[in-house]
Amino acid sequence: MYDRATGLEVYIRPFDGEDDYHEYAAPSNSPVYSGNRNERYIEAVDGQRFVMGVRVHPQFDRKGYKKVRAQYYIDGRWLKGKMIDCSQPSVTATSEAEGFVENTNGILQVKGFSFAELNLGTPPLRSPIPVTPFWFLLTNS
């Protein structure tokens, strides 16, 4: 999702691919339509690993700050935060997250992102999944 008004772009791509998933806007007559101009859907494949990313384009108003902190969420659950170096305002800065660290009974495990199995009752196994929004914090540290 590229928001031209802010200069921020959030994307999801397959773990083993370079191209972002194609995004779809929900039609206004769809039961999943929320009215949010930045809400997009992608086609998920059960079990497929994916990467979430952020691009900060030159027109983003950095307000003099040199770094942006992207917070990554899936289904409302915070997974990680990453700093994005935006010290060169004429360059599109990019950050990606491939997974997160989870503490299970005192054991730290690195887990990759993958699409959960969708149980829709009938084929096909592909279905639109909402792209979860991120939020950003500007910082010089």
Image: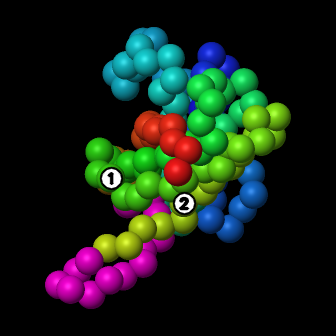
Q: In which quarter of the image is residue 104?
A: bottom left
Question: Residue 85, relative to residue 60: is it above or below?
Answer: below
Residue neighbourhood size for the residue with mark 2, other residues' Cα within 10 Å, grouped as few (<14), some (14–19), many (≥20): some
Quadrant of the rendered structure where residue 3 is? top right
Residue range highlighted in magenta: 103-117
Identified at 45% across, 12% down, the residue is 28
Q: For residue 23, say whether it is visible.
A: no
Q: Position of residue 15 (x, y in %)?
A: 62, 65
Residue at figure coordinates x 43%, y 47% from the top left:
71
Residue 27 screen position, x and y as percent: 50, 17
Residue 134 placement, left or right of 83: left
Q: Name the residue under label 2.
A: 97
Residue at the image position 66 percent from the left and 27 percent from the top: 60
Badge 1: residue crowd in 10 Å (few <14, some 14–19, many ≥20): few
Name the residue nearer the viewer: 64 or 45.
Answer: 64
| Colour pattern of the rendering | rainbow
Question: The disc labelled 1 sits on which kind of residue?
Answer: Trp
Is residue 65 highlighted in magenta?
A: no
Q: Name the residue under label 1.
A: 78
